[in-house]
Image (cartoon, rainbow, N blue to C red):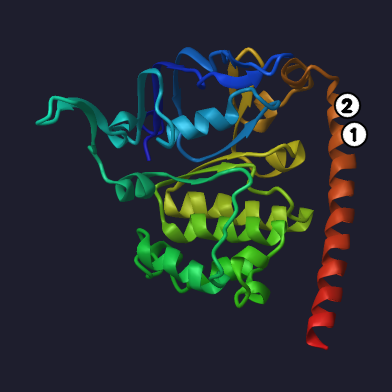
């Protein structure tokens, strides 16, 4: 995949709509949002890229724009040579026979085309369906680009079985997706993103709530999958140690919307991290270790509670 032709932002502007707030008298006021991107131009590479930076620095917005989930206010974004504006309808104003004005949305490209071009794992995704995990995995696999068949690049390995093994899903296949834990849901979402077979995948903090060994196992597979299948993966995550260990490329976001792109060794220097996060790099590392320890403890508690609940239900 030609790196220079994967993702291109050309003079892109984007601002979220005003937010409704209430003043001291209970009156609604519109709080104008600051531009997230202001005449932003960049060429971003294919491959496996980790997005690193503080909250509200533009990581999520960049991925939503790149994957055609939101449309820029102005400017152009090319993903794999396709102008992402083609996935948004043209609004035409017409008049009815009665002389009334109406707006008609005319689609240009199909939703299925967009999903094959780019799939997305959003933050805090939830499912209200009672369908079982295995049923949903099969639906995704059969209706995506793979059409239920293992791609040739995987040789003798069955990709469906491989994904279940890597993301440790065998014990939850018969359970309703609405009844699994946060960590189990995140692993299921990762499986969905692989089994659909999109040409690119944008993942917004997909490792949330997973145990550390599971994160390492998942990242090892995703990096290999990206290379073997020529699928670009952009993934945001807060764990700097994991980015350094697994990511071939890093895109570091600064609060002023500037970015640095390069290998972890080139980009994640103490000086750059302090500039991005506004705190000493040593403090970042200590916080990360503490957070990891707390998450491991929380995962153990959640696992114990699930085992006790299962014992009660089996009685």
User: From the viewer's perspective, is residue 99 above or below residue 271?
Assistant: below
Residue 261 visible, this angle:
yes
Categorize mark 2 by other alpha carbons within 10 Å: few (<14), some (14-19), many (20+). few
Quarter occupied by residue 164: bottom right
**Image quadrant where one finds the N terminus:** top left
Identify the disc placed on residue 272.
none
State the image coordinates of residue 270 (x, y, percent, origin top left).
79, 21
Categorize mark 1 by other alpha carbons within 10 Å: few (<14), some (14-19), many (20+). few
Left or right? Give the position of 71 relative to 134.
left
Q: What residue is drawn where x is 68% and y is 76%?
A: 171
- Asked if marks 1 and 2 touch (Cβ < 8 Å), the reply is yes
State the image coordinates of residue 289 (x, y, percent, origin top left).
87, 41
Q: What residue is drawn where x is 68% and y is 65%?
A: 180
State the image coordinates of residue 109 (x, y, percent, origin top left).
25, 41
Q: What residue is drawn where x is 69% and y is 18%?
A: 26
The total number of labels drawn is: 2
Q: Nearer the viewer, residue 128 or 36?
A: 128
Residue 167 visible, this angle:
no
Q: Residue furthest bottom?
A: 315
User: From the viewer's perspective, is residue 26 above or below residue 208?
Assistant: above
**Image quadrant where one finds the C terminus:** bottom right
Q: Nearer the viewer, residue 160 or 313?
A: 313
Left or right? Give the position of 142 relative to 55.
left
Q: Which residue is mark 2?
A: 282
Quarter occupied by residue 96: top left
Disc 1 secondary structure class: helix
State the image coordinates of residue 102 (x, y, percent, origin top left).
22, 28
**Cα–Cα span, label 1 and label 2:** 6 Å
Disc 2 secondary structure class: helix
Q: Which residue is mark 1?
A: 286
């Amino acid at each position: 995949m030609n790196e220079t032709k994967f993702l291109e932002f050309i003079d892109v502007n984007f601002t979220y709509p005003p937010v409704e707030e209430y003043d001291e008298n209970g009156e609604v006021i519109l709080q104008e949002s600051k531009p997230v991107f202001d005449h932003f131009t960049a060429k971003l590479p294919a491959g496996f890229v980790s997005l690193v930076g503080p909250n509200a620095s533009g990581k999520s917005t960049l991925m939503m724009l790149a994957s055609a989930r939101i449309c820029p206010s102005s400017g152009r974004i090319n993903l794999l040579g396709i102008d992402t504006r083609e996935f948004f309808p043209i609004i035409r104003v017409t008049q009815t026979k009665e002389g009334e004005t109406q707006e008609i949305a005319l689609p240009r490209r199909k939703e299925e085309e967009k999903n094959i071009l780019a799939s997305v794992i959003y933050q805090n995704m939830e499912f209200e369906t009672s369908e079982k995990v295995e049923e949903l995995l099969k639906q995704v696999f059969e209706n995506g680009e793979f059409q239920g068949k293992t791609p040739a690049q995987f040789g003798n390995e069955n990709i469906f079985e491989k994904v279940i093994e890597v993301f440790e899903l065998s014990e939850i296949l018969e359970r309703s997706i609405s009844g699994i834990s946060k960590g189990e849901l995140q692993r299921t979402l990762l499986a969905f993103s692989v089994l659909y077979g999109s040409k690119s995948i944008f993942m917004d903090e997909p490792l949330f709530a997973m145990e550390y060994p599971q994160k390492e196992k998942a990242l090892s597979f995703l990096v290999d999958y990206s290379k073997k299948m020529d699928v670009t993966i952009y993934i945001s995550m807060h764990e700097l140690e994991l980015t350094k260990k697994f990511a071939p490329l890093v895109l570091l976001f600064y609060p002023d919307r500037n970015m640095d792109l390069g290998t972890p060794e080139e980009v994640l220097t103490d000086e750059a991290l302090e500039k991005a996060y506004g705190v000493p790099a040593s403090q970042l590392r200590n916080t990360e270790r503490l957070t990891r320890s707390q998450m491991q403890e929380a995962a153990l508690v959640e696992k114990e509670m699930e085992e006790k609940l299962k014992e009660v239900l089996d009685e």
